Amino acid sequence: MKIIAADVFVTCPGRNFVTLKITTESGLCGLGDATLNGRELSVASYLKDHLCPQLIGRDASRIEDIWQFFYKGAYWRRGPVTMSAISAIDMALWDIKAKAANMPLYQLLGGASREGVMVYCHTTGRTIDEVLEDYAKHQQMGFKAIRVQCGVPGMQTTYGLAKGKGLAYEPATKGLWPEEQLWSSEKYLDFTPKLFEAVRNKFGFNEHLLHDMHHRLTPIEAARFGKSIEELPPVLDGRSDACREPGIFRLIRQHTVTPIAVGEVFNSIWDCKQLIEEQLIDYIRTTITHAGGITGMRRIADLHRFIRYVPVRNGPSDLSPVCHAAALHFDLWVPNFGVQEYMGYSEQMLEVFPAQLALRGRLYAPRR
């Protein structure tokens, strides 16, 4: 299956997405997502100027060989730009291989381990009452895993909130530059346990509860926070300062048994290895688009399986439906799956990328 073309498309149906299309001489095409939010053009340029020209003439069926060539062939390895580009190529090649075999990707990987993939949704509100109202709505929709984020009294802005009541949460901000926001760890640490207490008191423990600290806390603040909510307890996205440093999670682990998830900004198995081996975290949140594609994620999942870790797949709206399609097939196959993040897509996005929608808190893949 000789590769005859590799094209990069940058689109913006309400969000910037970078899509790679690889075409073989037999006419089979594969798609890969290379989106790196805020740095989309860097990845697009890396693909167009450096990697795509070297794909032409190669055998599309030699996925591992191509992965190793692009990973080891560069003196400057890893990093978000390089790994996002490699991920897109890998996704597209697996797409081609599945089409050539005339079977769904999850079958090619070894077959399904489950019928559907549990996903977690996002609930937000400026006040606890608004969060409870939003939570009830998503609970009625059938979600069994729900993330909660709330405005903090005395703070004008807080991470993870929708722009208005009743609107879907969208993390992207308008304008050329990122928003700058004021932050108070003291106010956050005082208020947020009250949010979890209110949710548990009203809805009980029937759903998996999640919360994202999103780099806002220092290591000792994160440890204090985890300790304060152990009786509730949610799964914390434990991104603290310098979150790749194992010593930080060793400190947090010494102070709390609240489950910790991390890995959204990880790019390879080497970012995860020590955290998993020393059991410093409970869940890993690496994503298909940023950690080496299907090939890279298989290695991480195999390491988890050896140590009995559970992946919690990262899936915000700044990853295109191409990534989510690949993640869905991966999640259906991988034995030690936890939960997949799901934010949905706007009608504008779905016109460009027709996508699978959540049904009663789960995603299902086509049988063909």
Image: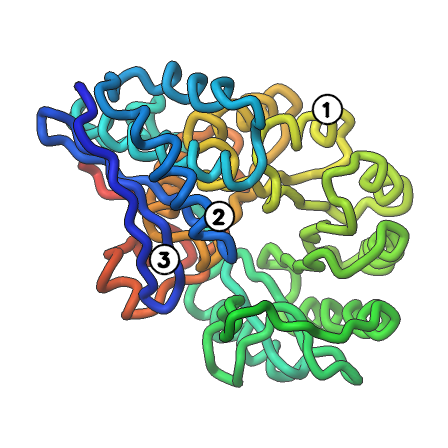
Compared with 47, 118 (above or below) is below
Q: Where residue 76 sits in the image (x, y, percent)?
A: 58, 27
Foreground residue among 313 and 199:
313
Q: Where residue 41 sits in the image (x, y, percent)?
A: 43, 51
Q: Of the residues under marks 2 and 3, which one precedes in the sequence?
A: 2
Res 215 quadrant in image: bottom right
Query: Which of the labelled discs sits on residue 216, or is there none?
Result: none
Res 127 quadrant in image: bottom right
On-image quarter of the C terminus:
top left
Q: Residue at x 11, y 25 (%)?
A: 25
Residue type highlighted by circle 3: Ala
Q: Where residue 331 sits in the image (x, y, percent)?
A: 43, 37
Q: Residue at x 53, y 67 (%)?
A: 171
The residue tagged 2 is 340
* Cα distance between the residues tagged 2 and 3: 11 Å
Residue type highlighted by circle 1: Glu
Circles 2 and 3, Cβ within 8 Å, touching? The answer is no
Q: Secondary structure at mark 2?
A: strand
Q: Secondary structure at mark 3?
A: loop
The residue tagged 1 is 277
Q: Where residue 57 sits in the image (x, y, percent)?
A: 22, 19
* Cα distance between the residues tagged 3 and 1: 33 Å
